[in-house]
Every structure is written in C-alpha cells, then in structure tokens.
Amino acid sequence: MKYQRSSQLFKAASDVIPGGVNSPVRAFKAVGGTPIFVNKAKGAYLYDADGNRLIDYINSWGPMVLGHAFPPVIDAVVSKAKLGTSFGMPTEIETKIAELAVSMVPNIDQIRFVNSGTEACMSAVRLARGFSGKEKIIKFAGCYHGHSDSFLIQAGSGAVTFGSPNSPGVTEGTAKDTLLATYNNLEAVAAIFEANPSEIACIIVEPVAGNMGCITPDVGFLEGLRALCDSHGAVLIFDEVMTGFRLARGGVQELYGVNADIVCFGKVIGGGLPVGAFAARHEIMSHLAPLGPVYQAGTLSGNPLAMAAGYAMLQALESDSEVFERLAQKTEYLHKGIAEALTLHKVIHTINRVGSMISVHFSPTPVVDFETAAEGNNERFKTFFHGLLNAGIYIAPSAFETWFITDALTYEDLDETIAAVAKIAPNL
Ligand SMILES: *Cc1c(COP(=O)(O)O)cnc(C)c1O
C-alpha cells in the first residue's frame, strides 16, 4: 500500500487545521503514521486519495450501518437539496422522521432534533436538571457523551486515546457537578446517591458502552440503575448515540427491556449527515422551550437534507425485519474467525461483542470497565492496526474504539479480514 498522496494532503492540512484533522479520533497519533485521506466510499469499501481500496470497519464511527452511499439515502438527499438546503422554518419531513423514530423506540412520546450527539447529550442533561430541579449528574469512567464540558471527566474515545480524559478548559465549578462512577459497579452508584442525598439530577450512561472498546452491561446493571433513579427521584438518561438504531429497532431499551427516561441519539439517525436527537415522554419533554422553561435551540436543527437522510435510513431499517439479526450474525462470524486466528498463535486477547459492535483487546482479563479496558497492550494493538491497514483493512486508530459492522460487508470481506488477522497473528 502506498500513502504518498495522503501524506501530502495531511501535510497541507496540518498547516491550516490543528493536527490536520477536524476531530482528534481521526489522527494516527496513538498508532503512528499518517491519517488516510478518503476520496469516496461505496458499500463496505473506502477508496483513498492514493487509489487504495480499504474494507471499512469504522463506517464514519457508526452511522453507515447499511454501508456507504446507501442509494435510498443519497437519492433522498439529492432530491431534497434541489428544493433548498435550509429555511429556519418548520418542514413536513421533520414530523415524518419524528413519527417514525417515536414508533420504533419504546417509551418515548416526543423527540427534538439537534446537529450532533454532543448537543443531544448536553441538552438531555439540561432537561434532566430542569425537570428534576437538581444539579449533580453521575457519569461513568470511560463513557463518552460528546465534548461538552460536564462530560470531559474521565471521558472515553478520543479523550482517553490522547491521554486527556479530563480536559484543560473545563472549570472546577463544572467538574464538581459531575460525579464519577465505575461501569458495571452498582454499589459505587448507590454510594454516590447516599453521599449526595437529593442532589442528583440524573445518571447518564452508554447502556452498552462503545467508547472504551465495546463493553456489555452486566446482568442487572441497567435494571439497578433504573431502580436507583426511581428511589432517588433522578432521571435515567440512556446515551444511545452509538447504539440507537444499531443494536435493535428500539435500541438498548428494547434489547435488554430496560426503560430510560431520556434517550439520546446521533450517528445512525442522521444517515451520515450531522444529526443528533433526544427523546422522552410528554411529561419530561413539555419542560422544553417553547412549551416550558428549559431552553434549547439550533439554527440548522431539523435541517431538511439531514432529516431526509435520516428518514430514508430509518425507513430502510424499519422495513427490513432481519437486518439486526443479519448484522449480529456477521459480527459473530468475524468474532469467531478472529478469535480462532489469535488463539492459534497464542496471542492473549479478549473480544467483546454485542450485535454489530465488536472490539478486540490485547488484554488477559475480561474487559468490563475503564480500568480493565486500559490494561490492553498498546504496542500489540499498533502492530495489529498497521498489519490490518497494510492488508487493506481499516479499523479505528485507537485501542479504545469499537468496530462498527455494516450490512454491506459480505462473508468474503469478513473472510479476507480473518485471513489478514491470521497473517499478522504470529507477529503479535
Ligand atoms: C459519538 C458519540 C457521542 C458524540 O456524538 P457527536 O456527534 O460526535 O457529537 C456521544 N455519545 C456517544 C455514546 C457517542 O458514541
């Protein structure tokens, strides 16, 4: 593989864009080398600036669950664009996608669209505070809820990849209202409630964690959070920006049968355009402006192109009764193949998987929380990453990220990936 053109483009970008990237997770700082500049993508494949074809396991960090340039989404965007790209006035497509989303997800009556997952989580917490009349929030180490100040406390994803899970620029005043708990540890959460009686507005949690690798909630963990919130009058926020419309039609609420009070969306719900959303029952949503006093707004929120893309995506997922099962089967096949190849060469590893999310950890112990995720061998990960890249397979340039399986992947693509792992394994 040659990356001359990407190197040139990265050099030019670095002159005018900090670190050459508009989001740090795209940098190759943690693995070494130059970020790949992409020209176009179709289905399961990326085509980069040097003409290489790569099998894509990032898929824009989640949105492209049905593959790149999915025709119904592209057609919807193109035809909408011809009618004008933004009005700052209500449009019918907003109601259509809202009706569809509300019908697919359990336990929500209304949904408000924003422009990113960050905005969705930030607004959800403000709403939870306004609704409950309390100020403190509980978040889990290694969970990522976007880059808003209150969430950059032991945050996952890029924040941990680049060694700053607590970012400078977040004031002590803000940080003190974010109370930190350990994923899969209910006792720790109960202790925080005990120590802060009547002060906790909400718990925000990735109900399947995806920003410290993929971590499954232990049996009873989500139910326990639900019960703690109920007994202390706190709001339970499921951040389903990654899991929503990916793990099931109704997300993790449906998958594990646990109800949240507010649910955040992003990624898949925008079909690859910049969209986030948060949703809840009437009782909670009626506190939001213009109905209620909790303010939240956006010049481009509900943008017609973004809504058209998201609507086409949700329609495709809604009308295909087997899509989530098919995704899970492909992911399981990949899991088995990679595990076999690594085991054959005695490479110590742990693989976590839920539905179409999977992560490979070079770690001897089960990966169940932030601490165990951080124990993985990063040198081995680097070799693994570059080995795959050289074989034309693109995974996230960080040991703390999930792989996102798309329905566009064929079993031949998966076999090619497994064969590449088998080839790299002796060097790990
Ligand atoms: C990606 C992500 C976010 C942030 O979404 P952006 O669109 O990047 O702002 C928030 N929460 C979770 C769980 C995510 O995976």
Image: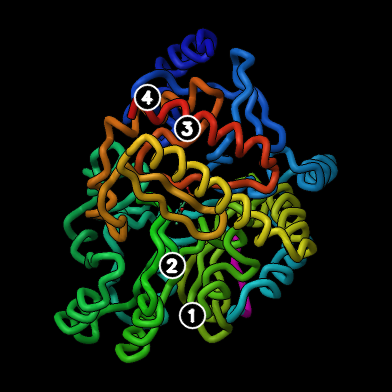
Is-magenta flag for residue 179?
Answer: no
Give, as a single range, the part of the protein colored magenta.
109-113
Q: Residue at horizontal 37%, vertical 89%?
A: 230
Q: Nearer the viewer, mark 4 or mark 1?
A: 1
Distance from the alpha carbon under mark 3 to that under mark 4: 30 Å
Nearer the N terminus, badge 1 or badge 2? 2
272 versus 314 height, above or below? above
Nearer the N terminus, badge 1 or badge 3? 1
Q: Which residue is mark 3?
A: 421
342 versus 41 height, above or below? below
Where is residue 48? Give x, y as percent.
60, 20
Name the amino acid type tagged 1.
Val
Do the CB atoms of the residues marked 1 and 2 lie less than 8 Å apart?
A: yes
Q: Residue at horizontal 40%, vertical 38%?
A: 344
Q: Which residue is mark 1?
A: 258
Q: Residues within 10 Å of mark 1 (few under 14, many from 20)?
A: some
Name the amino acid type tagged 2.
Pro
Name the amino acid type tagged 4.
Gly
Nearer the N terminus, badge 3 or badge 2? 2
